[in-house]
Image: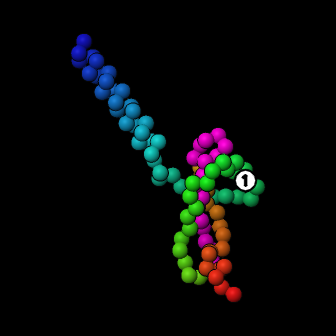
Amino acid sequence: MNTRMLLLASALACTAFAGLAQANDTSSKPVPYHYGMPLNVDKVVALTEPTTNECKVITADMKYIDTSGKPEEISYRKLSDACSLQN
């Protein structure tokens, strides 16, 4: 009886750790934005872009929570912040 309970507890613990590992997986690549794509943004979590001193088009990322509570990430093209500093 004790062996059976130990095996059951071990299996449940392994399943829980595997679920946590999948939940914390941040290796997914952001989905590229295309014109007209519905985003349903509830809350923006982070905006990131590469730093550059040149005025050029760059790829930026946005992490957000959608209206159903699911975290999402998209990438989009924009002018770098250096463009706003140039005359």
From this viewpoint, which residue is outermost toward the top?
A: 1
Q: For residue 36, which quarter of the picture? A: bottom right
Report the residue at 62% width, 75% height from top.
81
For residue 18, above or below residue 62: above
Report the residue at 66% width, 48% height from top.
42
Report the residue at 60% width, 52% height from top.
64
Disc 1 on helix, strand or loop? loop
Residue 5: percent from the left, percent from the top? 28, 18
Report the residue at 55% width, 78% height from top.
52
Residue 35 is left or right of residue 66, and the answer is right
Question: Would you call the spot at circle 1 few (<14 residues within 10 Å), some (14-19), or many (20 or more)?
Answer: few
For residue 27, above or below residue 8: below
Q: Is residue 69 magenta?
A: yes
Residue nearest the viewer, comparing 41 with 9: 41
- Of helix, strand and loop, which mostly describes the magenta segment? strand
What range of the chain is rendered magenta? 56-71
Residue nearest the viewer, comparing 73 with 46: 46
Asked if residue 31 can be seen in this view, the reply is no
Q: For residue 22, which quarter of the picture? A: top left
Asked if residue 54 can be seen in this view, the reply is yes
| Residue of label 1 | 37
From this viewpoint, which residue is outermost toward the bottom?
A: 87
Residue 43: percent from the left, percent from the top? 63, 50
- The amino acid type, in three-letter code, at marker 1 is Met
Quarter in which the N terminus is drawn? top left
Residue 14 is left or right of residue 24, and the answer is left
Residue 55: percent from the left, percent from the top? 63, 81
